Amino acid sequence: MTRSERSQQDALAPMGMGTTNVLDRVCASFGFIHGVSAEFNHCLDVENAGVLLALPALVSNGLLRHIDTLFSLPSGYYTLQHIFLLVSFLALCRIKTFERLRFCTPGEWGKLFGLDRIPEVKTLRTKIHLLVDQKKVAEWSSILSKEWMETNPEDAGVLYIDGHVRVYHGHQTKLPRHYVARQKLCLRATVDYWVNAMGGNPFFRINKAVDPGLIQVLRNEIIPILQRDIPNQPTEKELEQNPYLHRFTMVFDREGYSPDFLLEQKKERIAIITYHKFAGPDWSTDEFLPYTYEHSDGNTTEVLLAERGTYLSNKLWVREIRKLTQSGHQISMIATDYISDLRPISRELFARWSQENFFKYMRENYNLDRVIENSTEDIPDTTKVVNPHYRDLDNKVRKMNAQLGRKNKKFGALNLLTDIEPEKVQKFEQEKAELQQDIEFMQESVNKLKEERKGVKKHIMFKELSEDNKFKQLSTESKHLIDTIKMIAYRAETSLASTIKPYLNDKEDARLMIQKICVSNADIVPDKDKKIIKIRLHHQASKSQDKAIEKLCYELNETEIIFPGSDMKLCYEILD
């Protein structure tokens, strides 16, 4: 059936656009069936049917694992598998909000699932609410994270942790303000702490409406999860035999720099790599030697590195490694990994940009910062927050110190003046005296403010806040569910891109090509006798791209994926 024929048939459907399966829909409305079975028909040029190539990768990354045991839906037309597949397909096709489905042809999308049409936006949102009300999203996400680490233990050995500030522009609640580096503004926002592998693949994330800072989140939430879930950690006996051996490595930016925290984690046998916050004077350029990085794509990069041992303020001995840039700037990093060569240590820290790139890519392509629902939740009374009175005093101290610094700078500049005309000496001395008086007065005011600040608690319980200062947090369950599915979609896209990358002239085009395939048209040709469904892709822009797609189809066919909810095997090919 051609697209024109399908469009005419969907328009004439008796129960609305695309609802051609009348009998099953009536039965579902009375609760007689629990999900309709997939029924594929011969369809040409199905919109976005290329996204079906991602199905094996989605399934292998756990999209449909454990959902039947953790979640449930009441009797109806659509099943759990339909909902999870639809949300993942929307992410891969860059349909960034559910509301945009209103402008998508429901009948065409239905053909991807062997259905007459996909659910309406209202129905989809209702299903999502039913799922999140079961409070199983965190458990599902935790299980998947552990399985990803066990499947790729080499990725779990070095983990990147960073906070992502998610700005909130709504009016449901007055969230605390956070500095948003990409906008250079302090805006109302919530913070997500992400844990990623070296290549950028995500493992899990933790949301904090009240942000206690990276170190506290690491200490109280992230590290206990990693200690429990990371596979192939050294045994206690191995740790005793080698005092320099570590369980795993964490990499983060200067926000996590703390000599006491580094010492604490060294005792736990967890290695840390971060930037040196107080690097000191430059080293001699004679100390820097050329080293070569070998990348996964076969390319190499030469860098200039040097290493010393150094003591931090708490007498903790660490490795300090510096990179000399072409401009002569020295980038200093410290590590409590006492075993690895300096090349992998420096590469692991500089690869931290893979996580920054992940945030940028997810914002632009998967609408990571999108608020899923506008409802709010109460914050536990025992949550520690910054005392507003302390914050006001601290802001006054900072502001006055800045003014005092400018005054001192001006006073110092006057002291350096030696060649002064005689008729201006009196005016010069008067100006110096006034400045000195202002400085002494401001210094006295700063000291008083500091003394007052000492007598005020920096943190208090949320219940101790006045009603004017209290706020609510954004609902997290729906966001957590959608973010977890987006993680799976990103991991699936990454695996597909890595499959075709060796066959492309420009390796950087691999992910872009997967994006193009997902939104491309394809033919769906079922063979019920052989129990296969052929997904026939159209030709690409060049022979090299066709070759890459042929290799991808071969790899996907080796998986012998069965379409969920049916007994039909998917078979991928390019049109003859």
Image: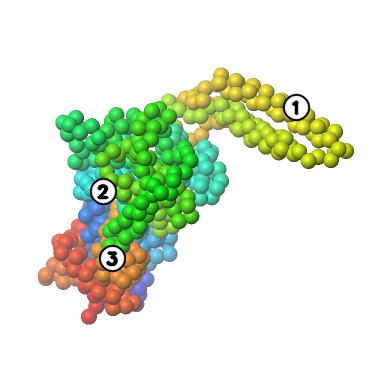
Q: State left or right for residue 487 relative to residue 447.
A: left
Residue flagged by tag 3: what amino acid is it?
A: Lys
Q: Nearer the viewer, mark 1 or mark 3?
A: 1
Query: Left of 170 or right of it: where is 255?
Result: left
Category of crowding for the residue at label 2, using alpha-carbon neighbours closer than 10 angstroms: few (below 14), some (14–19), many (at least 20): some
Mark 1 = which residue? 437
Identify the mark nearer the N-term, 3 or 2. 2
CA gap between label 3 and label 2 equals 20 Å
Quadrant in which the C terminus appears: bottom left
> Quarter-wise, where is residue 548 in the image?
bottom left
Q: Nearer the viewer, residue 51 or 388?
A: 388
Residue at the right extreme of this rendering: 423
- Most foreground residue, 31 or 252: 252
* Residue at the (38%, 52%) spot, across then down: 304
Q: Nearer the viewer, mark 2 or mark 1?
A: 1
The amino acid type, in three-letter code, at marker 1 is: Gln
Residue corresponding to mark 3: 501
Secondary structure under tag 3 reads helix
- Given contact means CB atoms under 8 Å apart, are the residues at marks 3 and 2 in contact? no
> Height in image: 450 above or below 113?
above
Name which residue lies at 22% across and 46% down: 153
- Of 253 and 104, nearer the camera is 253
Residue 355: x and y in percent read: 38, 50
- Mark 2: amino acid: Asp
Q: Residue furthest bottom?
A: 576
Q: Which of the two residues, 22 or 64, is positioned nearer the viewer here?
A: 64
Secondary structure beneath label 2: helix
Q: Disc 2 marks which residue?
A: 155
Q: Position of residue 505 (x, y in %)?
A: 31, 71
Q: Please tell me whether residue 338 is drawn above or below residue 438 in the rendered image.
A: below
